[in-house]
Image (tube, rainbow, N blue to C red):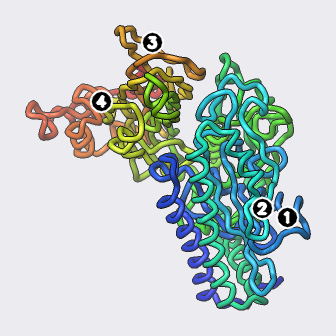
């Protein structure tokens, strides 16, 4: 199909309309979902595919959800070929058979028909608060097979010709610890796709049902051309990047994500040959998840206004060796993969790309020290009901780049800020918890001309006995890295203080049962970019006054002396320090606590 004659203005309007529809779907989800994981933290993403299952638009949600979204829609087209009708709604989650990322991310997909013709799909991928399995909250770090992680859903018709399959609905509610929440959240997902389908039908009617596909193909072609101009800015050649994987959730290991990017003739070949074999724990990736990680690493490396559709990556060939961390064989567990190993895939990609375009290099983002807490609201008789509380505030920080400091408390790298911290007052109403502290940690941001983001000091009392599912990948040594002379940020730690005053250092991974306790997370800092001695002294002063950097670290890391009143730079002393100070990138600016 030729799209060369399409009016570019109309084409831009079509892309904007598609993106707006994706956002409208997200607004509906936020306002109607029952679980705080959606209404507060927005752990979902809405996207649109054309009639062939090609992603043509996505909202600014969680990027790891959507880059591989086309795999899910194409699984529907494969499994229900000739059996897709108006008012059908499909559900899936399986990473091996249905284009899923990992089991907690359920995809609701609604086909859109106009004048009897299938023209598009409206989709919502959302991380459910609980889907059964061996640990409340879906993160079963003891899993060694996908069967330990919760219910597996191939492509299913949840609604057929407008009628809910009540038997299937009851099956889903039976396989969760939170049936009331899941019931409301599924209805919110379905409602969001209804809004998307209605808006898409209006757009197709305006374009003309016979020409709509031509315009959809046009936005894909435009995205391809835009990304080819990005490839033109890369140095031709072969560029390699690696990122270590130091544990399999059970024990330390020596593994890695290895990538080789070949830049040639406006094409990229992204080859993960050399990546370590799949591991015993739940840090193995699916094809859809690894593809999403590659796409978001490329999109985030270049301009933020690149079209967010699958056409942008038509010039990219991805090779994912089977049986490795990036394309595991059945029945490897996968629940942690959307965070780790996707984080490592993105870092390895950025390291390789930075060799081809050094001015776009980014320092490393740090890793999270999260937990999921689950128990009963009223421990006396269980009458308060079961709860699952996601402790998002152990969030990591972003790395510095040329011209900009890293973001504080930005969250997982794979969300790029899309996963937001919940309102603490709301959490106190919903859960048996009281928050003591949530503040930025001083001296955790990696030093640099553009420093990394700071980690968080987060403390909460849990008033009833609870299970703690720890996901503390960022605990211990610094998990970020500096570039161009910058330094790593500080490491992280998680401590539980029990009712008798005993302090327990939490493991990186594991599920433990504790009585009344205080959960204290110290999240790590992001890496710095550039020699800290070249940072503007006034910016260092501002960081000191904001509590991001201490006066001592300002002098030791940045060679900036702060006046005794703490309100100005001692310029004479600073000049002297910067003339005298030698610099070493061998050690991080601060160690793990």
Report the Cα–Cα distance between label 3 and label 1: 51 Å
Quadrant holding the N terminus: bottom right
Instruction: Pick whichever, 297 or 154, lies toward us.
Output: 154
For label 1, count other residues whose C-alpha is less than 10 Å away and answer few (under 14), some (14-19) or many (20+). Answer: some
Q: Is residue 324 above or below residue 286?
A: above
**Where, by quadrant of the figure, is residue 424 drawn?**
top left
Give the secondary structure at mark 4.
Answer: strand
Quadrant holding the C terminus: top left
Provide the residue designation for mark 4: 436
- Point out the tag, 2 or 4, that comes first from the N-terminus: 2
Instruction: Pick whichever, 395 or 566, lies toward us.
Output: 395
Q: Which mark is residue 202?
A: none
- Point out the tag, 2 or 3, that comes first from the N-terminus: 2
Give the secondary structure at mark 3.
Answer: strand
For label 3, count other residues whose C-alpha is less than 10 Å away and answer few (under 14), some (14-19) or many (20+). Answer: few
- Tags 1 and 2 in contact by the CB under 8 Å rule? yes
Q: Which mark is residue 77?
A: 1
- Point out the tag, 4 or 1, that comes first from the N-terminus: 1
Provide the residue designation for mark 3: 504
Where does residue 325 sit, x and y in percent of width and height? 76, 34
Residue 189 in sight in this render: yes
- Point out the tag, 3 or 1, that comes first from the N-terminus: 1
Where does residue 333 sit, x and y in percent of width and height? 75, 32
- Tags 2 and 4 in contact by the CB under 8 Å rule? no
Provide the residue designation for mark 2: 73
**Where, by quadrant of the figure, is residue 202 drawn?**
bottom right
The answer to whether residue 162 is left or right of residue 536 is right
- Point out the tag, 3 or 4, that comes first from the N-terminus: 4
Residue drawn at (54%, 47%), measured in percent from left and top?
A: 361
Report the Cα–Cα distance between label 1 and label 2: 6 Å
Residue furthest right in the image: 82
- Tags 2 and 3 in contact by the CB under 8 Å rule? no
């Amino acid at each position: 199909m030729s799209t060369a004659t399409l009016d570019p203005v109309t084409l831009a309007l079509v892309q904007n309309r598609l993106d707006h529809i994706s956002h409208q779907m997200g607004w509906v989800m936020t306002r109607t979902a029952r679980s705080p994981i959606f209404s507060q933290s927005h752990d979902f993403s809405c996207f649109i595919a054309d009639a062939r299952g090609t992603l043509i638009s996505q909202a600014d949600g969680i990027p790891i959800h959507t880059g591989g979204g086309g795999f899910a829609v194409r699984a529907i087209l494969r499994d229900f070929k000739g059996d897709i009708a108006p008012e059908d709604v499909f559900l899936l989650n399986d990473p091996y058979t249905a284009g899923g990322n990992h089991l907690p991310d359920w995809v609701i997909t609604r086909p859109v028909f106009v004048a009897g013709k299938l023209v598009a799909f409206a989709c919502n991928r959302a991380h459910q608060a609980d889907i059964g399995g061996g640990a409340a909250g879906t993160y079963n770090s003891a899993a060694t097979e996908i069967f330990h992680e919760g219910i597996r859903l191939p492509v299913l018709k949840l609604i057929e010709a407008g009628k809910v399959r009540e038997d299937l609905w009851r099956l889903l509610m039976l396989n969760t610890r939170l049936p009331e929440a899941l019931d409301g959240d599924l209805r919110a997902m379905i409602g969001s796709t209804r809004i998307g389908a209605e808006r898409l039908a209006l757009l197709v009617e305006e374009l003309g049902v016979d020409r709509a596909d031509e315009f959809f193909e046009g936005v894909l072609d435009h995205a391809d051309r835009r990304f080819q101009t990005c490839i033109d800015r890369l140095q031709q050649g072969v560029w390699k990047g690696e990122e270590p994987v130091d544990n399999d959730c059970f024990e330390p290991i020596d593994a890695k994500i290895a990538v080789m990017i070949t830049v040639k003739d406006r094409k990229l070949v992204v080859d993960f040959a050399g990546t370590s074999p799949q591991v015993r724990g739940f840090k193995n990736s699916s094809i859809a998840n690894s593809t999403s990680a590659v796409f978001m690493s490329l999109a985030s490396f270049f301009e933020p206004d690149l079209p967010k559709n699958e056409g942008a990556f038509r010039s990219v060939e991805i090779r994912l060796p089977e049986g490795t961390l990036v394309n595991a064989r059945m029945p490897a567990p996968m629940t942690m993969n959307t965070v780790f190993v996707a984080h490592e895939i993105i870092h390895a990609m950025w390291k390789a790309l930075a060799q081809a375009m050094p001015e776009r290099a980014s320092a490393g983002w740090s890793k999270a020290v999260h937990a999921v807490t689950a128990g009963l609201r009223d421990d006396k008789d269980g009458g308060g009901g079961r709860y699952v509380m996601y402790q998002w505030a152990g969030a990591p920080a972003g790395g510095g780049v040329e011209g900009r400091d890293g973001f504080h408390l930005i969250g997982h790298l794979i969300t790029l800020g899309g996963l937001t911290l919940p309102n603490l007052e709301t959490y106190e109403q919903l859960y048996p918890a009281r928050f003591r502290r949530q503040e930025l940690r001083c001296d955790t941001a990696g030093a640099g001309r553009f420093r990394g983001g700071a980690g968080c000091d987060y403390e909460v009392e849990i008033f009833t006995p609870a299970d703690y599912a720890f996901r503390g990948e960022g605990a211990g040594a610094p998990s970020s890295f500096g570039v161009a002379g910058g330094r790593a940020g500080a490491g992280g730690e998680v401590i539980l203080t029990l009712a008798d005053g005993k302090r327990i250092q939490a493991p990186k991974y594991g599920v433990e049962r504790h009585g009344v306790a205080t959960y204290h997370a110290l999240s790590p800092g992001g890496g710095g970019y550039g020699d800290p001695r070249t940072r503007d002294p006034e910016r260092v002063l501002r960081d000191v006054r904001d509590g991001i950097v201490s006066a001592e670290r300002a002098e030791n890391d940045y060679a900036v002396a702060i006046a005794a009143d703490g309100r100005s730079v001692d310029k004479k002393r600073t000049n002297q320090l910067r003339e005298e100070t030698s610099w070493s990138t061998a050690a991080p600016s601060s160690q793990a606590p």
